[in-house]
Structures are given as structure tokens and as C-alpha cells.
Image: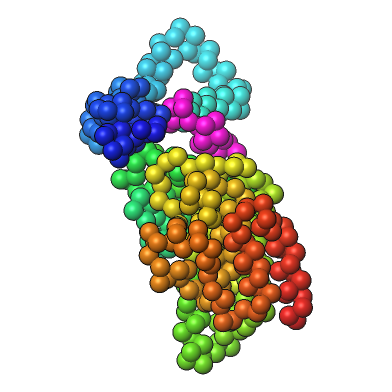
Amino acid sequence: CHTGRYGSDCRGTCGRCLKGACDPITGECVGGCSRGYRGPQCKEECPRGWYGENCSISCGHCHSLSGCDPVTGICLDGCAPGWHGVFCLQNVFKTSQSFHSSPSFPVLIISLVAAVIIVSTFFTYCVVVRPRKTALRRLYNASSTDHLANTYEQIVGSPWELQRGQLSISNELLGNGQFGQVKKGHVKINGKKIPVAIKSLKDNASEKDKTDFLNELSILKQVGKNENVVCLVGACHIRGVMYVAMEYAKHGDLRTFLRQSRRLTALHEYDNTSTPSLHTALRPQALIKLSLDTAKGLKHLADKQIIHRDVAARNVLLADKLVAKIADFGLSKNDQTYVKTSSTRVPIRWMAIESLFNNTYTLQSDVWSFGVLLWEIFTLGGTPYSSIDSQQLFKYLKDGHRLRKPRLCDQDMYAMMLQCWNDDPDRRPTIEELTARLNRMLENSQ
């Protein structure tokens, strides 16, 4: 069996074993359990009051019987009276009693007024910043990559950190998945309220979900600012929950927009508002502009060696003036070549042929997916290979078949799509070349 699997047919997974290592016959974890689990096969969740690898660490002095998070150890309902810190391990009363019993107490009281600024600075660092960083270092085991293990810590005290008072979260749900959700909210910066989309994990999120969530946050930090990418506004850690605030795109995702535009056009409806109308958005020039926007966003990612791995119309959001922005970095990797070894669900109909057969992802794999995205744009939100079963898709592509030419695109645009779907990744155009060609197409269409 390959690493991470066991059994006579190698179908069993060692998913909760530390480093994914288990006995290939019995499935018993040979190196212990990942955080939050225990038992021979690491299938038992930590009992209340315990957390960490093999559930070997006891929770701090948490406020209620709900205890602490079995993965991170952070108290779910805050600290019991007299205790503070992320893990509720620092005794306020003990510090206070030793201070008052000291014979030099009167002298210290007199000196306190003169030293208030120094004491405040020292208190802020030692009680707020330093304990938070120390505690957050413990969120991941030694097998985690450095940039993931330090993601929380790098947020604390950085320009990305948002204070709790800056963040307001509404009940308006923008997106909802099995383990995470996105709500609309606002961030207050320099007295101005900025609309944002706030992503957080649900209570039933697994350790892998939390790792993927932090991976996306890490990627967002590396992405920085770009007009055609949904960028990070900041992050806030509140009572054991990390909230990630991102740019808000009020027109929603591109696939839904295209499909709504298709229906409205069939009814000959027009929109005379100040923003571009849905009917206008269906003209060839506007479709090329959407294509160019997404290409620019992918070029920005490629310049930073970030492989998106899920390029599709559903992961493109539309902001003011229908500016398209690449979004959803949940599957992204910062690596020139990435070989997938986990069982994460993947978007088969958008995947490059080498990704389907070899689990290999490169920047040129994103180019293949971008070709499918172009096809979605010019079919107004069509479903790729809609008449072909997912199991048959492998053979269909291997035999050289490709998506048919959309009715709304010309031969030059379709030729570019076909080049994106070349079997050989090295013979596909780069995203930089595609951006330049789309820019010329847009100029020629005006």
C-alpha cells in the first residue's frame, strides 16, 4: 500500500494518524494520533478536558464545562475567574497576591505613577502579544510546514491583525459549506466602515479543515494587493475562532452572473442603471474584458509562483463596474510543482490531463483550467462536458477529445482555448502570453 493507506485492497485511509503513517495491514497508527484524536487507529475524539496529539495535554482553566478545543487547546468559552491567556494558564490572583505581600509595596506604589508608561508597554508585550504568540505556536505539530505553523503568529501584531472592535459581522450569509461559512460584515479602518466578506470555520471542522483554512490565509497574505484578485483585508482571533476578512464583491460569482444574464437576454430585458447592464455584459467586448480580468489575476498569482488549482467561473467574483477577481484559494499551493497526495475533493471537469492522471499540478495546469474558464464565459455559464460521466471523462480526454466551440466566440478565441488544452504542458501558452493576446483582442474589438 502507498503511504496513508492500509488493508488487503489498500482502500483504508490513515487520515488521522500522525504524518498519515499507519500499519499497512491493521491500520493502527505507528507514530501516534493527530491533534484531537486517540486510540489504536486514532478514531476516538479527545474526551472533554484534553487536547493535542494522542489527547495527551490537559486543558487550561476554562470558564465552563465545554472545555477547550480538542485540536488547539484554546478554551471555547474563555477563562475561569482568576485566569487569563489564550490557554487560560496564567494566574491573575497569584501575581496580585505576591505583589501586595512584598515589603517594598509602598515604594512600588509611589514609583508606579512615574513608571506608568514603561509598565503599560511591558504589560502589553508580556501579557498580550508574547503569550498569544507562544500559545499560537502550539496550534500545529512539528510535521506542519513552517509557513502554516507560523500563520497565526505572523498575524499577531502585524498590519493584517484586526482588533475585535474593528470587526462587525452581520447575519447575511454569502456562502456556506460543510465546514465553513462566509458572512457579510464591515471592518472599521481610519474611521471608515469597509464592506467585507468574513470567512470562518464551523464548530464541526476537522483538523484538516483547519489546516486548509490556515493554508488559504497564508496564501492570501502572500498574494498581496491586485485589482483582479480578491485580497485579504485582515484577520481577527476571537475566543478560539479565526475570522478572515476579504474584499467584498457585491455582484457575486461569475458563473451565477453569466447564467442570470443568459436568461435575461432571452427575455430582452435591459438595465439602465449606472452600472454596466446585464445585456451589455453579454456583448463580445465585455466577455473578452471578463476573460482579460481573470487572466491578469492569474498572472499576478503566477508571478508569485502560486498554483491556484481550482480556476473556474464559480471562483471568480465580480466587484464594482463588473471587475472580475480571482477568489477562493482553499486548494492553492505556493510551489512550482505540486504532487497531490491527500484525498481532498478536486474539480475534475476543470482539471488538466496531467493532474487527472498523475496528480501533478503546475502553473501550466492552471492554464488548462483557464481554458475551461474561457469556455464557461463564452457559453454563459455552461457546464463543461455536461453529457459525459465523470468516470468516462478520463478516456474522453486521453483519446484527444476536447470541449466544442461555443457559439458566442470566434475562431481565434477557440484556437486559444484549444492551445490551453494541449496534452503537453510545455506546449501550452503561459498565462503571461494569454494576457497579452487577450489585451490585443480587447483593443481590436473596440
Residue shown at the point (46%, 47%) measured from the top left: 243
Scheme of colours in the image: rainbow
Residue 102, horizontal then vertical, whole percent: 44, 9
Q: Quadrant of residue 239?
A: top left
271 shown above or below 207:
below
Residue 328 is situated, as x and y percent measured from the top left of the image, at 51, 55
Q: Residue at x 72, y 57 (%)?
A: 432
Determine if residue 416 is in view.
yes
Q: Quadrant of residue 169?
A: bottom left
Farthest top residue in view? 103
Q: Residue at x 66, y 57 (%)?
A: 428
Q: Is residue 117 left or right of residue 63?
A: right
Identify which residue, 125 or 143, lies in the foreground: 143
Is residue 217 visible to the viewer in this orientation of the structure? no
Question: Which quadrant of the rendered structure holds the N terminus?
Answer: top left
Q: Quadrant of the C terminus?
A: bottom right
Viewer-side residue, 129 vs 137: 137
Total marks shown come to 0
Q: Which residues are magenta?
A: 139-161
Residue 167: where, in percent of width, then height?
49, 52
Q: Is residue 62 above or below residue 176?
A: above
- Tell me if residue 105 is in the magenta stretch: no
Q: Position of residue 140 (x, y in %)?
A: 44, 30
Vertical position of residue 41 compared to residue 175: above or below: above
At 53% from the left and 45% from the top, the residue drawn is: 360
